[in-house]
Amino acid sequence: MTLFIEQCLNGLQFGLLLFLLAAGLTLVFGIMDLVNLAHGSLYMLGAYFAATFTAWTGSFVLGAVLALGATLMVGMAVEVIAMRRLYGRDHLDHVLGTFGLILFFDEAVRLIWGPAGLSLPLPGWLNTSVQILPGIQYSAYRLAIIAVTLAVAAFLYVLVMRTRIGMLIRAGASNREMVAALGVNIKLLFTLVFGLGAVLAGLAGLMQAPILTVQIGMGENILILAFVITVIGGIGSIRGAFIAALLVGFIDTLGRAFFPELLRMVLSGPAAATAAPALSSMLIYILMAVILVAKPEGLFPVGSK
Amino acid sequence: MSGALTPRNVVIAALLVGLALLPLYVSITGDRFLLTLFTRIVILAMAAVSLNLILGYGGMMSFGHAAYLGIGGYTVAILAFEGVQSGFVQWPLALAASALFALVVGALSLRTRGVYFIMITLAFAQMAYYLASGMARYGGDDGLGLDSRSQFAGLLNLSNKTTFYYVCLILLCASILLVWRLTISRFGMVLRGTRSNETRMRAIGFPTYRYKLAGFVIAGTMCGLAGALVANHTDFVSPAMMYWTRSGDLIVMVVLGGMGTLFGPVFGALALLFLEQFLPTLISAVVRPFNPAGAVKAGEYWQIVLGPLLLLVVLFARGGIDGLLRMLSSRERHG
């Protein structure tokens, strides 16, 4: 039981973290109609910046804030230099162009930080465990991640649904040309939205950094998961991304933890032992295939254009 | 394709003659490495040709094409591991396995379009990748080596590098021929029509889904054969063959060479693998005058040049290499 609760919390934490990535991806796609494979690179940069700045300043929080600023700058620079020229081209161009950016960022990181990974040590006050229920201890840092991501999700909700910028974002998602025709500075809006996506990706990266190693290519696996989430949720829908992210977080974490046991009940010993690891990492993709077959536009399709 | 002596046709002819005569050059100079490199180029060109059929002619943006390389390769390697050495069994089964996978993936994926199609094909390829990583009996993450290449009962000895190169080259030419015959057939016309305007094709009565699915399966099967060749070439298969960046590489080849053109994918494969091979040397040469000590090391960072190069191709050279040759050709004809 203890293990189950712990794994559920892990699933929640992973799902919320994925939401940060997927939200940026889906915003950028919904508004600029841009498929951005390089989103994972921003996640990686967030982690590298955080590790570096924390080492310089000696403070995890200060390092994180500086890292977010740096990721924002890189994100906006990428938008102005490269992405801006890709809007309005077809998706194949986006895939190729941003694939090129991945190669560039991976190599640039290797040039600057070297091929070996970095580690980002946690400060003492986060590196403890808290008693959440009688007899159940849970990592304080993972709880902090849950709190921060929930706060960010709430902030995003208010930003998109309750502010003027959010109104423009939603308007831009449903009809770009009309928003531009009404005199909104659409170029600036796009740069800001891309920057917002970059910050969210950087935040996800730097929060994941103390749990995993900071290394080249760390953004690629998680990028695919984030894509799966945006597709399941319906591309362009933040609500869809939130629900799909939790779904994927739970299924992935619980699947890895308990699926082998479940399989052992159905199949004989050796067969289950062979099939389990492969099947549990395939679960999410099977889920995606099933959902797309039933609902080809995802769970929460954004209104037809 | 006109018979005129345009620069484009001259380059294509020179390329084919060059590929055919390469083993002769190698036997004179003794440069065995060149033969290995070109065998790889020819095999990957075949994979790119198959992707071009659906991506270039059919407008289906599959982001999981490397999965078929893996499935073809793994079929050969697993059969060899289980003691079936005969190529007459291995290769048809490799084709059948990739055709079956393409049928399932295509039947499900083609219900979606746009980005959803890109992502679902990617997801299926990742599934194949994880399946291969999870097969502990067949090496899991570490991959599986081949003790011997496919046996063709004394007809062919694939362990002979020159023989193997010619087998690959002949299969590449056959693939190009097949794609050519397909694209000028009624089937190909429907496929190309579907790329330009699917709604209209359906309105005039074509069951476009079936046509697209047929194209998807043909491409997958062709790529499966290329996978069987890869396994025989490297004597090794691993999940990394199917990783999504490999699918990205195949797309790069098609676009770099020229989408929807017969020889574009061959140019693309040649260009990408040449860049991979010679860009490091080139970078070292450029850096050397400024920093003699760091020159060799600088060459290791060649992808920092390749990445932006891809972006530039996307932004400014949509037709790829074939488009460039075509431009030269038409300029000559008019001027």
Image (spheres, rainbow, N blue to C red):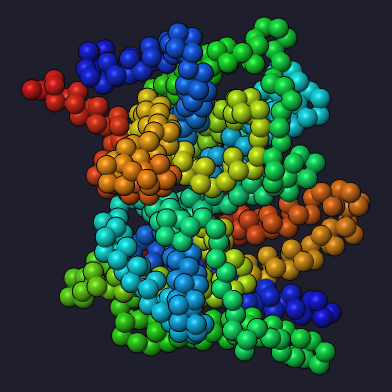
**Left or right of B81: which side holds A179?**
left
Quarter of the image where the N terminus of chain B is located: top left
At 39% across and 84% down in the image, what residue appears?
A159
At 63% across and 56% down in the image, what residue appears?
A285
At 55% across and 58% down in the image, what residue appears?
A116
* Residue found farthest to the left: B335
Instruction: Residue B12: give x, y in percent of width and height.
Output: 33, 18
Reply above or below: A304 against B221: below
Q: Is residue B160 visible?
A: yes
Q: Nearer the viewer, residue A123 or A9?
A: A123
Quarter of the image where the C terminus of chain B is located: top left
**Left or right of A144: which side holds B193?**
left
At 59% across and 76% down in the image, what residue appears?
A121
Instruction: Residue B94: give x, y in percent of width and height.
Output: 67, 28
Instruction: Residue A266: give x, y in percent of width and height.
Output: 88, 56
Reply above or below: A92 against A132: above
